[in-house]
Amino acid sequence: MTLSEFHHSQAKAFIDIGGYQIPTYYQNAVAEFHAAQKAAIMDRSFIGKLRVSGKDRETLLHRLTTNEMRHLPVGAGVVNIFTNAKGRVVDVVEMFTEAESIFLLTSPGRVSMVKQWIEKYTFIEEVRCEDLTAQFGVISLLGEESAALLQKVFAWDVGNLPAQHTRTFVVEGRRVLVQRSGLITPVQFNLMVAADDLKKFWQLLITQATPAGHAAYEMLRIHRGLPRMEKEITDEYNPHEVGLLPFINFDKGCYIGQEVIARLDSYQKVQRQLAGVRLDLSAPDDKLFAATPAPIYVGEQLAGQLTSACFSPKVGMAVGLAVIRKQFAMPAVVLEVRWPERSVQGYLLGADNADLR
């Protein structure tokens, strides 16, 4: 049985993410969410994988992205943002350095766009950009006991691995790259292996960890207050407004979109911000949750948009993420989400959903 066959034999529902059929859940999304608090695994081979090589790779990527990524030692990495001339996001990527290249993990369905964006702005630079999505599989570990799980299964000591850094191991002659994640995803570690070895490592891990689907991943993401491409991160908003400020270096040199992003910061022109919301729904309503974005009102004033929502087993109510106009962005502000079929009241949480963690 291939790993794809395992997913189709065990999963109860699927969702299309970036052109891939991804398990929504296997047995029970709530149980998988609870497991993901401790140790769960998810096949995220659908995320894009690019290798950028050539002697000018660092210079080129530096002038296309918002974060400082020059002079990183081999194995170090950052979360970085490709922005267009209007300061809008092309993609948010995790990048790390290899001996002769820089590796990028892109958002699902964005790998071709990012590759084309890099090639569009490659003029006289000596740079080569390869799409390796099909060549590598990715198993993501969720939960605070992920490092202990890797220690137990493989005897790897990765508990002290810094965020976005990588370490390489060899298991029975098979190379495994372990990356510490967690800054822009709810993932603790990504294990990147050759596609042909994916099933072997999955089988080793599943003896000690619960498989989790997209529903549990999204619940975890929303609880952590993390924005996602095509949800919070869209052409409608700039990076300031959707929680991406930690990945913008205001001291670095010029990059595409820098003037717009810097001006918003310097002149305090940012009008909206990412916030958590709690909704007066005491039972799951997946159809309603899927109907986002949905307008949010405070009284009769349009205050923003609900961008993501799920039912929280932690609080027994629906929770979500929203982009809110700053004048309304205060905890406990009473709001109303107005879907076409119904309206639901609720209130604002802190900017990062910290009280739901």
Image (tube, grey):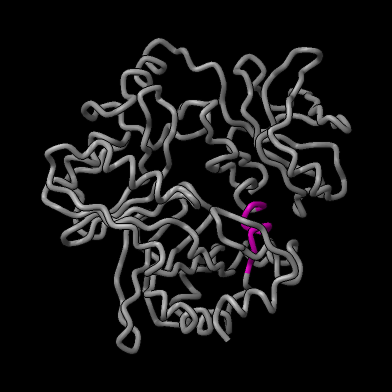
In front here: 117 or 71?
117
> Residue 307, relative to residue 165: is it above or below?
above
| Magenta stretch holds residue 72 | no
In front here: 282 or 102?
102
Q: Residue furthest top?
A: 267
Say which residue appears at 88% left-offset and 33% top-offset: 341
Image coordinates for residue 105, horizontal then vertical, percent: 39, 54
| Magenta stretch holds residue 215 | yes
Image quarter where the N terminus lies is bottom right
> Residue 226, relative to residue 219: is it above or below?
above
Say which residue appears at 20% left-offset and 52% top-offset: 128
> How many circles with numbers are drawn on the protein?
0
* Left or right of residue 343, residue 244 in this image: left
Say which residue appears at 42% left-offset and 82% top-offset: 154
> Residue 86, relative to residue 315: is it above or below?
above
> Residue 90, relative to residue 336: is it above or below?
below
Image coordinates for residue 110, horizontal then vertical, percent: 45, 47
* Left or right of residue 89, residue 95 in this image: left
From the image, give the main secondary structure of the stretch colored magenta.
helix
In front here: 309 or 8?
8
* Left or right of residue 60, residue 283 in this image: right
Magenta stretch bounds: 212-219
* Left or right of residue 31, residue 94 in this image: left
Image coordinates for residue 72, horizontal then vertical, percent: 20, 50
Say which residue appears at 51% left-offset and 58% top-offset: 187
